[in-house]
Amino acid sequence: MTTAAAPVLPPLRLGPLEVPTPVVLAPMAGITNAAYRRLCGEQGAGLYVCEMITSRGLVEGDETTRRMLVFDEAETVRSVQLYGTDPAYVGKATEILATDYGVAHVDLNFGCPVPKVTRKGGGAALPWKRRLLAEILEAAVTAGERHGVPVTMKTRKGIDEDHLTYLDAGRIAQESGVAAIALHGRTAIQGYSGTADWESIARLVEHVDIPVLGNGDVWEASDALRLVAETGAAGVVVGRGCLGRPWLFRDLATAFAGEPTTTLPSLGEVAVMMRRHAELLCAHLSEEWGCKEFRKHVAWYLKGFPAGGDLRRALALVSSLDELDRLLAELDPAAPFPVLELGSPRGRQGAPRKGVALPEGWLDDTDGTAGLAREDVAETTGG
């Protein structure tokens, strides 16, 4: 008689929500649309978060914002990340998401390091203002509670090593009724460079009683297991590691079920996944726009595989599903997975910034909101 393996962690509890596999797909601007969430969801259990939207854009009825709030018919749990710097807007936006869009989980972004966001006091800059952070969290939690919608938050260690915010942010989150907090183990000034500091995740776990999710440098399922073992985190948030590799969620599901495996698809199997991705994009966006959106994913899917430059360029300019089928047929289906790519970074990296763009006088105190700019309606880049 075969004994089933014991799960590594219990299901992740977020208020009334139970996530069987404690893995969250990080919202990524221009990536985690309905098609990509469906594709990842087909690979394994977890929570898949819509790309970030702005609270002001949603409240004021901005068309671009509304178009982003599209969900696939297979999404049984709708999850959205919200950005905002004004408690009133964030609270109202949370209400709209719950009542008008059937959203079951709202995540608040306090981790984006992009200059156009931090310059306005948003993203990773905002937790420096403790009172404002509390007001935003309380507004979202109050709105969510009326509809049984849990609110979580994502943050970074801080602005830089001299201006760390994550421990205070964790305390404030817990006091405000936030269901869980995700910590990216980098500061805003680091961007996506260097190595994530998992020790900070462990310190936050010890500091709060609510679930802490670890984020940063989870490239393989084995990294996720190591992160939770070293930090005591209740789960992981995965972003860049799944770019061009949606099957990573299959590996994560089996790993957290106590039966770790590493999927090594042949190039032919990757081509099938590429076709499925493009097909889903076209179904949601139209064939023309779906193929245009698919182009950005080509280099990630083919990373490390043998494919000539001309073929790669042609795939990165594909304009129809028929053309995609012809080009994919030129790939060598028997080519093995490039195992040297396992564990290597994917997506944005770069070098540390020379400084973090902040409103004038932002660091003078940790309470006031002087210099806080009104958030843009236009969508911003997640992080």
Image (cartoon, grey):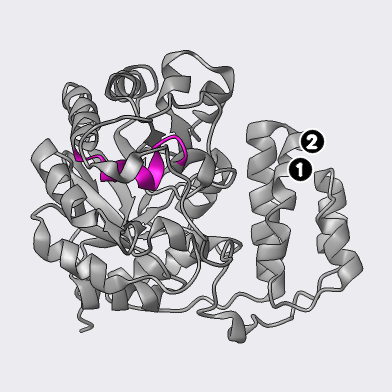
* Residue depicted at x 24% and y 41%: 365
* Residue depicted at x 30% and y 36%: 105
Where does the magenta region start and end?
119-130
Q: Which residue is mark 1?
A: 292
Q: Please give left or right for residue 272 compared with residue 45 in the image.
A: right
Vertical placement of residue 90 versus 199, above or below:
above
Element assignment for label 1: helix
* Residue depicted at x 28% and y 43%: 364
In front here: 43 or 112? Answer: 112
Residue 55 picture quarter: top left
In front here: 46 or 6? Answer: 46
Looking at the picture, which amino acid does disc 1 mark?
Lys
Residue 90 visible in image = yes
Mark sitting on residue 288: 2
Is residue 69 shown in magenta? no
Vertical placement of residue 380 versus 156, above or below:
above
Looking at the picture, which amino acid does disc 2 mark?
Glu
Vertical placement of residue 57 versus 257, above or below:
above
In front here: 301 or 349? Answer: 349
Does the CB distance between marks 1 and 2 fall below 8 Å?
Answer: yes
Q: Nearer the viewer, mark 1 or mark 2?
A: 1
